[in-house]
Amino acid sequence: MSPTSPRIAIVGVAGRMGRTLVAAVEQDAQARLAAGIVEPGSSLAGADVGELAGLGKLGVAASDSLEAVVDNFDVLIDFTAPQVTLANLAFCAEHGKRIVIGTTGLSGDELAQLDDYKAQVPMVFAPNMSVGVNLTLKLLQTAAKALGDEGYDIEVIEAHHRHKVDAPSGTALKMGEVVAESLGRTLKEHGVFAREGQCGPRSDNEIGFATVRAGDIVGEHTVMFATEGERIEITHKASSRMTFAKGAVRAARWVAERSPGRYDMQDVLDIKG
């Protein structure tokens, strides 16, 4: 394996994100598409991955199992569902592979299971692979430290397409966590995820969340710091899944050269600390 040209496998190549990931790998001169995975028993097994993505033939046939392509790839990119991701992580641990995980909606117990493999598998896990979102997280950290304990109310508002199955989004939760940690709070104690009826006035330390699901919105996130006389809003808007896909491919190139451990996109971008 060339350290700058890892062989990449993509899980779920027939889905919206999978097709975008195929295109992102093809656009990256430092990565090589080596395998594409569809659901076990899928009628799409054997189809050319490029044709599934609308790119024409790429010479890579879709497989319905990782076992069938285990010798073909170095890094797996997984944007699927929690239980599928955990099974694929175990596979990577068994076979000495690396993995980039963009799956959202993992429970606390499932997130803890990622750490069970960090001594065996070089992995990048991030609820959002966008470079812009991860720079936004740094801005939120700075803003929270400057504003949060000075009478500013904090609200996180997110919007996604009608097909998204988890709420709030993983990115919204991460934004809330960054703000909470900067202020010595926790979302478990201070997060407010629903308001309805006679819920009473807002408490000083709560971090509120609001969720929108509509149409084909790719992803929009705003964190509001509001006080008497002014409001500061830090917003990120994604207009294409390609921003997440390009970040994932960048993460795959980066993790191909790393020792076992659980990393995130701020490690990849070297903006942690």
Image: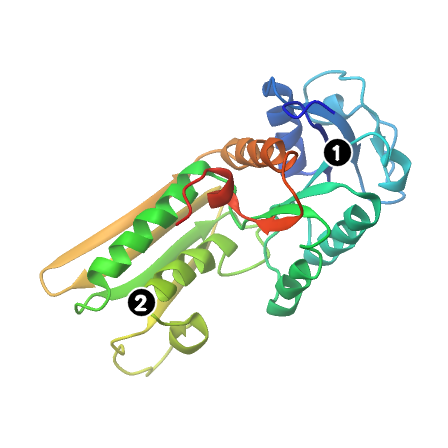
Q: Are marks 2 and 1 in contact (CB under 8 Å)?
A: no
Answer with the quarter of the image where residue 150 lies. bottom left
- Please report the residue visible at 32 percent of the width from the left and 46 percent of the height from the top: 235
Which kind of residue does numbered mark 1 sit on?
Asp
* Figure label count: 2
Answer with the quarter of the image where residue 249 lies. top right
Q: Is residue 65 visible?
A: no
Which kind of residue does numbered mark 2 sit on?
Leu
Answer with the quarter of the image where residue 23 lies. top right
Quote the CA–CA distance across marks 2 and 1. Answer: 40 Å
- State the image coordinates of residue 170 (x, y, percent, origin top left): 51, 55
**Quadrant housing the N terminus:** top right
Question: What secondary structure is marked by label 1?
Answer: loop
Is 141 above or below relative to 110? above
Q: Which residue is mark 2?
A: 183
- State the image coordinates of residue 119 (x, y, percent, origin top left): 69, 55
Sequence order check: which comes first, mark 2 or mark 1? 1
Most extreme residue toward the left is 229
Q: Which residue is mark 1?
A: 74
